[in-house]
Amino acid sequence: MSEIEVPKGLNGVVVDETAVATTDDSGNLLYRGYRAVELAERVDAADVAYLIVNDRLPSDSERKEFAHKLKEHSGMDGKVSEVMKLLKEKDVMRNLRSIVSLYPYESKDDSDLLLEIAARFPRIISDTFRISRGQEPLEDVDASFSERLYYLFTGKKDAEKARYLNKLLILYMEHEFNASTFALRVTASTLADPVSSIVSALATLKGPLHGGANAEILDFFLGFKDEEEARNYVDEKVASKEKIMGFGHRVYKTRDPRAQFVKEEIRKMDKEAHIFKIAEAIENRMWEKKKVPANLDFYAAIYMHMLGIDQNLYTPLFASSRVYGWIAHYNEQLEGNKIIRPSSRYVGKTGREL
Ligand code: COA
């Protein structure tokens, strides 16, 4: 078999087919053929999760059944809460990954099992965040997908903020062969169990070049007293060839449609906000100096900050949405499975004698 050399990082390499999501010729992200930003504007996040997993928007009865299934599995096993207390770990992504890996997987239907796990994400995240900070877990609420998530992540009931959160959850839900989804597909392709596949995805999402980016943005951001200081920061980073979190993307080289959508939502919330002005100054300077656009994580971090969500929950929030994309890809991978196992070009030593 002749081997093919591909660019580092598989940049620009098509490794398989997918019917879940793509970016069209105009740069729009499509979920199952629908524009993601239009779904974010008009549809409930639970319906979009259903769409991504099932390839169609739900009927009324399917919507009820889906909500029932998520609710049925949304609770927390008492033993798991004990494990959380023992972990004494403040990093929510590490806890989420550890807790999910303990999940029993004797259920017969993988797809149902994956939904059970997805349904538990908000509760695991909320409880582990609170327990590790010496707080009592919150009582659950009977509310919509986004309202419940907003409550579990902030301890507050706020229908308007939940409506804003609904949009972000949709934009985070799916993005074809991104790194965590690809890791999940590699694991699934070995016919490992669904829990292991989700754990691979979680472990990969955590990295700062992927989902972890949104948790690092406010660190450099909140200290700037004015736009000039922010622009100087960009100039210094560019001069020293360092990356700025929240910029650049493998797919979007001029404009990330999700970032621009979230930016407009922030403008609606409060266009005079100091943080918004700083953000625009950084975005404009980055474009001027490097021609690198702001990605979703850049504006999502500001958005979540304005919604009153703790920074430690930004990447976990991403995970509790992206998990529905992972389910769709797990199913797709197994439908036409071939183990993902590339080759390498050896550059090490040869012929060494003992
Ligand atoms: N800050 C400054 N410059 C950046 C940059 C950033 N965040 N992201 C990309 N660039 C520059 C690179 O330095 C490179 O410039 P050069 O050609 O002058 O060397 C060029 O843009 C291409 O970047 P590259 O890293 O090769 O792109 P990639 O497709 O391999 O990587 C990311 C994509 C997302 C990993 C990368 O943009 C990045 O590290 N971004 C920061 C982390 C982040 O926000 N991740 C969330 C992604 S949604």
Image (cartoon, grey):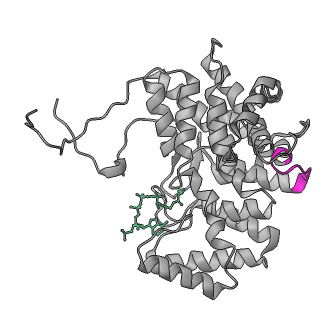
Q: Relative to 26, is 288 above or below?
A: below
Residue at the spot 62% in from the left edge and 58% down from the top edge: 214
Question: For ligand 1, which image quadrant applies?
Answer: bottom left
**Residue 233 located left or right of residue 353:** right
- Assign the magenta stretch its main secondary structure: helix
Q: Position of residue 157 (x, y in %)?
A: 92, 50
- Looking at the rendered structure, the number of numbered marks drawn on it comes to 0
Q: Specify the farthest residue to the bottom.
A: 228
> Which sits in the foreground, 255 or 283?
283
Q: Is residue 159 magenta?
A: yes
> Which sits in the foreground, 203 or 29?
203
Q: Relative to 292, is 143 above or below?
A: above
Q: Which part of the image, by quadrant, shows the C terminus?
A: top left
Residue at the spot 50% in from the left edge and 51% down from the top edge: 24
> Which sits in the foreground, 281 or 88?
88
Q: Which residues are magenta?
A: 151-160
Q: Relative to 285, is 53 above or below?
A: above
Residue 339, can we see it?
A: yes
Q: Position of residue 35 (x, y in %)?
A: 62, 50
Q: Position of residue 113 (x, y in %)?
A: 66, 21
Where is residue 114, by image quadrant?
Answer: top right
Q: Position of residue 350 (x, y in %)?
A: 11, 39
**Residue 287 located left or right of residue 317:** left
Residue at the spot 58% in from the left edge and 53% down from the top edge: 212
